[in-house]
Amino acid sequence: MLGLHIADIFILVLYFIGMAAIGVWTAKKIKSSDDFFMPRRFGKAMMVMFAFGAGTHSDQAVGVASKSYSIGLSGIWYQWLWLPVTPFYWLIAPVMRRFRAITTGDVFEARYSRSVAMLYAVVGMLNLSVNIGLMLRGSSEVISASTQGLLSA
């Protein structure tokens, strides 16, 4: 099927089932928009998953695969580079709760002014626009190569 081995298909199906199960499990705990945006009842396991998700991005798989191919096993450090920063995610969550802020822009607005929050939002949108474009392009090249051209970029 599209040049994928049966083991690849099995892993993809297992991943999607796992993500759906986590989604259903967390959806049962959310009763209001406050529970969604400012979760106060996250357990330790959920906080670990949340911090991991906040610190990783889907485009990193493309960069790690590229560098691992060109320089070998040490290419994994393109992902592991951020490991020392992970504890700061645990420190930031209580600060955001004390600020009663949902986004970093809310913190900038409360601490400085609305114009600083707007500047942060504009710079963030421009940064994400470029990152998403590069991620989609890189991912399409990886998909094209892994399916031996059956799905073109």
Image (cartoon, grey):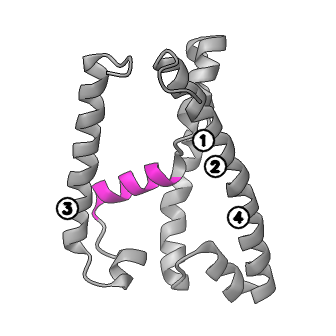
Instruction: Identify the mark nearer the N-term, 1 or 4.
Output: 4
* Residue picked out by circle 2: 132
* Residue picked out by circle 1: 136
What is the distance, in whole Å, between disc 3 and disc 2 at their CAs? 29 Å
Instruction: Identify the mark nearer the N-term, 4 or 3.
Output: 3
Residue sitting at x 24%, y 69% = 27
| Helix, strand or loop under label 4 | helix
Three-letter residue code for mark 3:
Trp
Q: Position of residue 55 (x, y in %)?
A: 53, 49
Instruction: Identify the mark nearer the N-term, 2 or 4.
Output: 4
Image-based side of 71 in relation to 89, left or right: right
Three-letter residue code for mark 1:
Leu
Image-based side of 61 in relation to 23, left or right: right
* Residue picked out by circle 3: 25
Instruction: Give 91 or 129, whichever is nearer the viewer.
Output: 129
What is the distance, in whole Å, between disc 2 and disc 4 at their CAs? 10 Å
Q: Residues within 10 Å of mark 1 (few under 14, many from 20)?
A: some
Magenta-tinted stretch = 43-54
Residue sitting at x 64%, y 20% = 67
* Residue 44 is covered by the magenta coloring: yes
Mark in front: 3 vs 2: 2
* Residue picked out by circle 4: 125
Q: Residues within 10 Å of mark 3 (few under 14, many from 20)?
A: few
